[in-house]
Amino acid sequence: MSDIETTPTRGYTATKDQLQKRLRRIEGQVRGVQGMVEEDRWCIDVLTQISAIQAALDKVALGLLDEHARHCVMGAPDGERADRTDELMAAVGRLMRRG
């Protein structure tokens, strides 16, 4: 028996480094907005940055949805594909209801 622990493969595994780089960039943008508020910057400038952050997060989410659909839904065994499709559509619904 092998004692090697295996990490599950996720839909984003192949692009994990790129995903983490994008998320770190977004994290920096959020810190920048915190600084803008601390400095009493003009409301419209703060809102513009928030909009950019939301767009960046949407892009990350769409990429994850795409990778999930290709890897986790289409690659699922026939008996699991319907449940995985339902999970995917529920996630899409949650993303669309925000705001």
Image (cartoon, grey):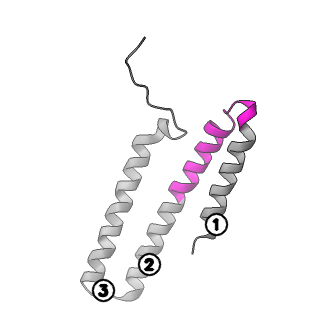
Q: Which residues are magenta?
A: 59-80
Residue at coordinates 66% horizontally, 62% vertically from top-left? 93
Dot 2: what SS?
A: helix
User: Which numbered disc, 2 or 1, marks the residue closer to the eye?
Assistant: 1
User: Which numbered disc, 3 or 1, marks the residue closer to the eye?
Assistant: 1
Residue at coordinates 68% horizontally, 43% vertically from top-left? 84
Residue 71, image x, y percentages: 61, 36
Which residue position is annotated with label 1? 96
| Most foreground residue, 70 or 92 | 92
Dot 3: what SS?
A: loop
- Which quadrant of the view contains residue 99? bottom right
The N terminus - image quarter = top left
Residue at coordinates 63% horizontally, 69% vertically from top-left? 97
Q: CA distance from mark 2 to mark 1?
A: 21 Å
**Circle 2 Cα neighbour tier, 10 Å, few/some/many (<14 / 14–19 / ≥20):** few
Label 2 vs 1, first from the N-terminus: 2
Label 2 vs 3, first from the N-terminus: 3
Q: Is residue 93 left or right of residue 19?
A: right
Which residue position is annotated with label 3? 41
Amino acid under disc 3: Arg
Amino acid under disc 1: Met
The image shows residue 74, relative to residue 45, as above or below, that is: above
| Most foreground residue, 4 or 71 | 4
Q: Is residue 16 left or right of residue 34?
A: right
- Can residue 54 be found in the magenta stretch? no
- Which quadrant of the view contains residue 78? top right
